[in-house]
Image: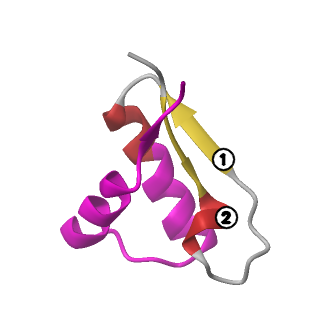
Amino acid sequence: MGRKYIDCREYGGDGKCSLYLSADTEEELLDAVIEHATAVHCYQDTPEFREKMKKGFKEEP
């Protein structure tokens, strides 16, 4: 099984964020995504937001 990743460029916003996050586990990736999204993009850490982000996770080849 490959690493999980998410690319911030795929989520709109101001289009200036080029961060690409990857991790071996979904839990580790989700923690990093939430930290980035709340600190940099001012999103609220809610169960709904977490679920939305998890749905956007992809697996590296």
Q: How many residues crowd mark 1 within 10 Å: few (<14), some (14–19), many (20+)? A: few
According to the picture, the residue beneath numbered tag 2 turns out to be 9
Q: Which stretch appears magenta?
A: 32-61
Q: CA distance from mark 2 to mark 1?
A: 8 Å
Horizontal side, residue 44 vs residue 38: left or right: left
Q: Amino acid at mark 2?
A: Arg
Pick out the residue farthest to the right.
Answer: 16
The x and y percentages for residue 57 are 41, 47
Counting residues from the start of the chain, the first of labels 2 and 1 encountered is 2
Q: Amino acid at mark 1?
A: Tyr
Element under disc 2 = helix
What residue is rendered at 70% in x and 53% in y? 19
The x and y percentages for residue 48 are 22, 71
Residue 51 lies within the magenta run:
yes
Evaluate if marks 2 and 1 touch, with contact meaning CB atoms under 8 Å apart. yes
Horizontal side, residue 59 vs residue 41: left or right: left
Q: Quadrant of residue 46?
A: bottom left
Q: Main secondary structure of the magenta part?
A: helix
In this rendering, the answer to whether 34 lies above or below 15 is above
Q: Quadrant of residue 24?
A: top left
Pick out the residue farthest to the front.
Answer: 61
Q: Quadrant of the N terminus?
A: top left
Pick out the residue farthest to the bottom.
Answer: 14
In this rendering, the answer to whether 26 lies above or below 17 is above
What residue is rendered at 76% in x and 59% in y? 18
Q: Quadrant of residue 31?
A: top left
In this rendering, the answer to whether 22 lies above or below 47 is above
Q: How many residues crowd mark 2 within 10 Å: few (<14), some (14–19), many (20+)? A: some
Element under disc 1 = strand
According to the picture, the residue beneath numbered tag 1 turns out to be 20
What residue is rendered at 52% in x and 65% in y? 37
